[in-house]
Amino acid sequence: MSNRRFGVAALAAVVLGVLAASAQAFVGMHTNQLTFSGAVALPGVVLPSGSYSFEAMQESSNLVRVWNRNHTRVFYTGFTRQVDRPRNLDPKRTVILGEATRGEAPPITVWYPIGEARGHEFIYAR
């Protein structure tokens, strides 16, 4: 009987360890649901109008992932540069769009997670 109890206890410890590690991977993640009325661009991809989930993988990380609203398709994963939110920028503003030539989607140059003083500047090839 003691071997069986030991096996159950060991299994419970493994399950708790996996759950703790999974929860820890999401600590500090910043996620915002953003909706665009027209197409916008990120490095290497154009997002048609619609809703998207922007995620900074950790608070101090420069890695950003953009999903569709249901988290079933990844549109973008890439490194960014952290930038400070300008003091005169409306705190409700979450993205800064760059210039685009006529007929092209404007690029998202910076995403500021809601309520955060620092944002993520996307890196475009020149």
Image (spheres, helix red, strand yellow):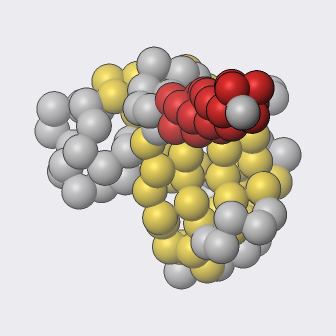
Q: Is residue 88 above or below residue 80?
A: below
| 97 left or right, relative to 107 | left
Outermost residue, left direction?
88
Residue at 23% across, 45% down:
115
Q: Is residue 43 left or right of residue 108?
A: right
Residue 16 in the image: x percent, y percent?
57, 34
- Image quarter for residue 19? top right
Q: At which x and y percent is residue 26?
A: 52, 37
* Quadrant of res 7: top right
> Image point 57% across, 23% down: which residue?
62
Q: Is residue 104 left or right of residue 49?
A: right
Task: Say whether residue 25 is visible.
Answer: no
Quarter of the rendering occupied by the C terminus? top right
Counting every numbered tag in the picture gives 0
- Near-viewer residue (122 or 3): 3
Residue at point 19%, 49% (across, down): 91
Q: Nearer the viewer, residue 125 or 115?
A: 115
Q: Quadrant of the N terminus?
A: top right
Q: Residue at x 75, y 48 (%)?
A: 76
Q: Position of residue 53 (x, y in %)?
A: 57, 60
Res. 13 in view: yes
Residue 112 vs residue 106: left or right? left
Q: Name the residue furthest front.
A: 1
- Check the image and report above or below for 53 versus 114: below
Residue reaching furthest to the right: 44
Decide: is 44 above or below 33.
above
Q: Could you say where residue 92 lies in the image, as x and y percent from the top left?
A: 23, 57
- In which image quadrant can residue 70 be found? bottom right
84 vs 18: above or below: above
